[in-house]
Amino acid sequence: MTEEKQKQLGKTLWAIADQLRGAMDADDFRDYMLSFLFLRYLSDNYEAAAKKELGSDYPTQIDSSVSTPLQLWYESNLDDVPAFEKQMRRKVHYVIRPEHLWSAVANMARTQDAVLLNTLQKGFKYIETESFESTFQGLFSEIDLTSNKLGKGYTERNAKLCTIIQKIAEGLASFSTDVDTLGDAYEYLIGQFAAGSGKKAGEFYTPQQVSDVLSAIVTLDSQEPKTGIRPRLDSVMDFACGSGSLLMNVRRRMQKAGGTIGKIYGQEKNVTTYNLARMNMLLHGVKDTEFEIFHGDTLANEWDKLRELNPAKQPKFDAIVANPPFSLRWEPGEAMADDVRFKNHGLAPKSAADFAFLLHGFHFLKDEGVMAIILPHGVLFRGGAEERIRTKLLKDGHIDTVIGLPSNLFYSTGIPVCILVLKKCKKPDDVLFINAAEHFVKGKRQNQLTDEHIAKIIKTYQFREEEARYARRVDMAEIEKNDFNLNISRYISTAVGEAEIDLDDTHQALLDLEKAIAAAKDTHNRFLKELGLKLLP
């Protein structure tokens, strides 16, 4: 499917969402809409694989007693079902029972079947606990089919579900539903829901244009970016992954360049967005064995995998991307000062956890890895504990690039932000500053980076190019003279100098003007004289 048709599918689904979402709370409706899209993907993928696996045994015709060909095969081959499902787990990594397939559910919605709600409950529970080899417990935890928000009683809730599912099924009917199509439609809808949710959008969505910059940076060779994209990343991590859009962008960029990723890792504290991220992975064809998303607090380091004390076993990542919450208040206990993530640099202040997030990610970065993190501008110049952390990172040669972005790019805040690029082992002994703050297109609600703006940032980083009023390489001696303050305006002037005036040229220009005026006056007076009118003095 072309990119235009993929976008059209997203717009069609959003139009349906616009019609229906007034029926319930906006966040609740988002979760229902995305969950049903996810079920559609799993079902289509499973049915296509089943048809290929069964070959000529796959039923070509069905009667009114069943909803799908697969249901007919199941009922006709009960003894063969266990072996078939074992084979499907091996090939597509999951199983869906025929009665839980989207086509069966959509048919129940079309006929206003009274047991639709119960069937969905059983289907969601089966997918969470039995479909996959690895458990996806709680995947649909935000979908409460017994909630009064859906209706006062079973009958009303069932009827509302029938309406929602029928509309979605009609919207999807005329579109191809391959992996990329539904995955892109899912991300399009997340972006649209984010646009309408204001500050809450920051919890789960990084604007695509900013995501493009980060993903490009971490996929380039860490030591020699000018050589291009690395052929393989063994591991990629986002410790505040939201709905997983940043991680998906890294994967897309690697795939487009013919590269590969070993495994994708993410962490997310909010349970709703944690589930969105897991669905996002599967919807883009990432097998359950190819990613791991953990639900837990990053700053408290609740993930056992990251708490491994043996350095030889501790996970390290080739690429780390992150868009953590800006200037989050946190409460580091006394023990945090000795935490391996922070003890060499110090604790971030309680008023702003920005450097705590940065140090968490940096601790798990491989020596040859790259980390790109979005942070508020305050981290560049604030004093106190943040100044000490910033100074230590600079003296140790870990801050590679500082990129200033325009204001009002995010749905959740209008403040300008920056991207810090960090490396444990970097070749240049200077810091590259890129001032992209004035390079944008003004939008109705958010400012936009065009493809040209994005390409310019990436090219400047990749080739470490300098350009007046835009980019400059600054050596450590100058940064030290500025007390390790990284405020971009200290190193790149955006002021437009006044043009020098050449007095001789200006004098001659005035003489020429006077001659031209005199000539024009003479001509005008000739016309006046011919007309018998009063001449100009």
Image (cartoon, rainbow, N blue to C red):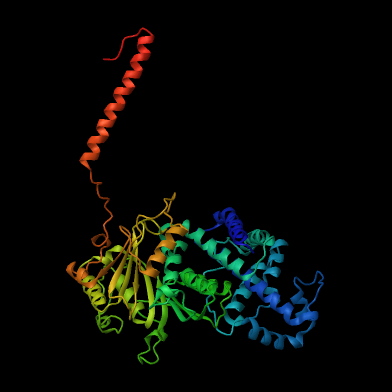
Q: Pick whichever, 504 or 73, lies toward us.
A: 504
Residue 272 appearing in the image: no
For the question of whether residue 62 can be seen, the reply is yes
* Pick the front one: 188 or 3: 3
User: Foreground residue, 377 or 482?
Assistant: 482
Q: Position of residue 525 (x, y in %)?
A: 33, 15
Quadrant of the frame with the N terminus = bottom right
Q: At 72% from the left edge and 65% from the top edge, which residue is drawn?
A: 107
Front residue of 97 and 321: 321
Q: Going by the image, does 456 lie left or right of 168?
A: left
The percent coordinates of residue 383 (x first, y second) are 20, 67
Instruction: Find the residue positioned furthest to the top.
Output: 532
Quarter occupied by the C terminus? top left
Q: Residue at (42%, 69%) from the top-left corner?
A: 214
Q: Is residue 303 above or below residue 481?
A: below
Can you give x and y, in whole percent of width and height, for residue 240 in the image?
Answer: 41, 72
- Residue at image point 71% right, 79% down: 50
**Image side of residue 52 versus residue 375, left or right:** right
